[in-house]
Image: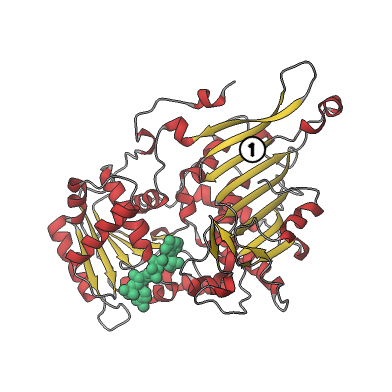
Amino acid sequence: MNAQTEARVDVPLEAGSADQRRPDPCALVIFGASGDLTHRKLIPALYALEFRGLLPESFAVVGVARTQNSTEAWREEMRAAVTEFGRDEMRDDVWKRLAAGMHYVSTDFSSEGGETEVMKLLEQLDKERGTRGNRVYYLAVPPAVISTVVDKLGERRHPSGWVRLIVEKPFGHDLASAKVLNEDIVSNFQEQEIFRIDHYLGKETVQNVLAFRFANGIFEPIWNRRYVDSVQITVAESLGIEDRAGFYEQAGAIRDVVQNHVLQLLALTAMEPPADFEADAVRNEKVKVVRAIAPPDPGYVVRGQYGPGEVDGKKVPGYRHEPGVAPDSETETYVALKVFVDNWRWAGTPFYLRTGKHLSSRATTIVIMFRPAPHPPFLEIAGEGLRPNLIVIQVQPDEGISMRIGAKVPGQGMTIQPVNLSFQYDRAFHVHLPEAYEKLILDAMLGDATLFTRIDEVEAQWSFVDSVVAQWQGSAPDFPNYAAGTPGPKAADALMARDDRLWCR
Ligand SMILES: NC(=O)c1ccc[n+]([C@@H]2O[C@H](COP(=O)([O-])OP(=O)(O)OC[C@H]3O[C@@H](n4cnc5c(N)ncnc54)[C@H](OP(=O)(O)O)[C@@H]3O)[C@@H](O)[C@H]2O)c1
C-alpha cells in the first residue's frame, strides 16, 4: 500500500483550516504591544485571521505599553512585522480593514490612573466600532507585571460585556508562585474567563494527537503497557537563548519547556479518551495524567549546559559566555529524564523526555515504541532487520506521522527491513498549517478553553517540576557538558543505554 497516495485527498486550499465560528464583536487589548511576541506572533496572527474573514464583524485592537509611540507609527511598525513574520502575502485591502481598528496607548498601568486612557478609548470604540463592551485582554508582559494589570482590569469591568483574560507562559516560577499569581487573578476574574496559554496546544500537529488516537479505531486497543515498550518525547531546539538571558537564567530548560510543552505532549499521549471534546472533559483527563507522573529516580535525570560549538555552520559561544549570563551559571540548557505514569494503562512503561537548546537540529517528536512481535521463527530468519514497530508523531518541522513496519526485501530469502508508512500534512492537505496563535486567539474570543491550561493542571505540572528541581539542590553540576550543535550530553545516551535502549534520532 502506498500510504502517501492513500492519504492524499483533494481539498480546496484552506478548507482544512477554515473555522466557521465567528466570535461576538469585541475589542482585543494587548498589554506588551511594543514587545517581541506582539511583533512576531500576535499581530501576524490577527492579520491571518482577518485574511480569512475569521475576526468579528465589529472588532478593534488596542496596543498598550510604556514605550512612547503614536497610533500611526505603531500601525506602520505592525504592518512591517506582518510583512516580515506573517504567513500570508501583505494585501492592502486586508491590512486596511485590520489597521482601521488598531490603536496604541502609551501608559504605565502601575502608576496612579495609568489605566484611565485605555478605558476611555475602549468606551469610545464600543460606540464607534460596536464592540459592545466585550473585551479580550492579552497579557504579553513579563510575569511581574501581571498582578498590577489584572487588579486594575478587575476594578474596571464593563457592566454588561463579557471578558476574557489571556495569560502568557510562564505561569509562575514554581508551585508556590503559580498559586500566588493565580490567587491574584481569580480575585479579579472567574476561572472560565481565564485562558492560560501554552502555544504548543494551538499547533495542528499537537491537536492531531487527539484525532490520531481517538478518531481511528486501530490504535487505541494497543495504546497501553501491554503493547507499548516505551515512549520518547523530544523538544530539541537548534537556537540558543537568543537575547532572553534575563528570563532564561531564572528558568532553565525544565521551567521553560518541560513544565509546559513537554508535559502537555505527555498528557495528550497518555490520557484516557475524554467523554466529549468540551474543555472540561479534555482537561479532566489531561490533569489525571500529570498527577499520575511519579517523581523521577535521581539516577534517571540528566541536566546539561552547552559549551562553545558550531550550529548551522556558525561558531557560537558557550552558554556561560552569552550576554547577560553569569560566568559560573548553573542554569541547565538541557534536561533528559525517565518518568513513569502510575496508572492502570501505563504502569511500568517508561516515558523518556528530553529538551535542550543549541542541539544539532530542531525537532519536536513523540515516538511510541512497540514491543517486538512475539514470533520467534521470524527472529531466527529475519535477523538484524527485524525491528520493533514504532509510530513517530512529528510535531515540527516536516509535520506528519509515520509508522515503521518490517517488510520483506524482494528476492529469495526472508530478509526483513524496516520501512515507513507516512502521512505528511503538506502532501495530504496542500495547506500551510496555521500558526498556533491564530487558533488560540480565535478560541479565546469564542470562549473555548479546551486548548488552554486549567489551574489544576498548571499546579500539577509545577509539583512535578519542583520535585525534580529539589533533587538538584546542593549538587554542583559538571557544566558545560555538551558542545553546542551536538545531540546533547553523553550522560543522556548513557541513561538510555542503562535500559538497553537508544534515543530515536
Ligand atoms: N516572545 C515569545 O516568543 C514568547 C513566547 C512564549 C511566551 N512569551 C511570554 O510573553 C510575554 C512577553 O514576551 P516578549 O517576548 O514579548 O517580551 P518583551 O519583548 O520583553 O516585551 C515585553 C512587553 O511588556 C511590556 N512591559 C515590560 N515591563 C512593563 C511594565 N512594567 N509595565 C507595562 N508593560 C511592561 C514591554 O513594553 P514597555 O517596556 O514599552 O512597557 C513590552 O511591550 C512574557 O511573559 C514571555 O514569557 C513570549
Examine the rendered structure and indicate whether residue 60 appears above or below residue 104. Answer: above
- Quadrant containing ligand 1 reads bottom left
Q: Residue furthest left?
A: 128
Q: Which residue is mark 1?
A: 391
**Residue 377 in the figure: left or right of residue 438:** right
Q: Nearer the viewer, residue 488 or 65?
A: 488
The kind of residue on which mark 1 rests is Ile
Q: Residue at x 78, y 63 (%)?
A: 299
Q: Residue at x 56, y 69 (%)?
A: 317
Q: Residue furthest top?
A: 412
Give how far across and how far down residue 88 sits, in percent: 31, 45
Give how far across and how far down residue 76 sits, in percent: 21, 61
The reply to whether residue 168 is in sight is no
- Residue 432: image quadrant is top left
Q: Residue at x 24, y 65 (%)?
A: 159
Report the quarter where the N terminus lies: top right
Give how far across and how far down residue 59 sits, in percent: 22, 54
Q: Secondary structure at mark 1?
A: strand
The reply to whether residue 500 is in sight is yes
Examine the rendered structure and indicate whether residue 375 appears above or below residue 465. Answer: above
Q: Nearer the viewer, residue 356 or 207?
A: 356
> Is the CB of mark 1 within 8 Å of ligand 1?
no
Q: Residue at x 41, y 32 (%)?
A: 430
Crowding at dot 1, Cα within 10 Å, few <14 / some 14-19 / many 20+, comes out as some
**Residue 350 in the figure: left or right of residue 233:** right
- Residue 287: image quadrant is bottom right
**Residue 156 in the figure: left or right of residue 422:** left
Q: Nearer the viewer, residue 401 or 170?
A: 401
Give how far across and how far down residue 198 sits, in percent: 48, 57
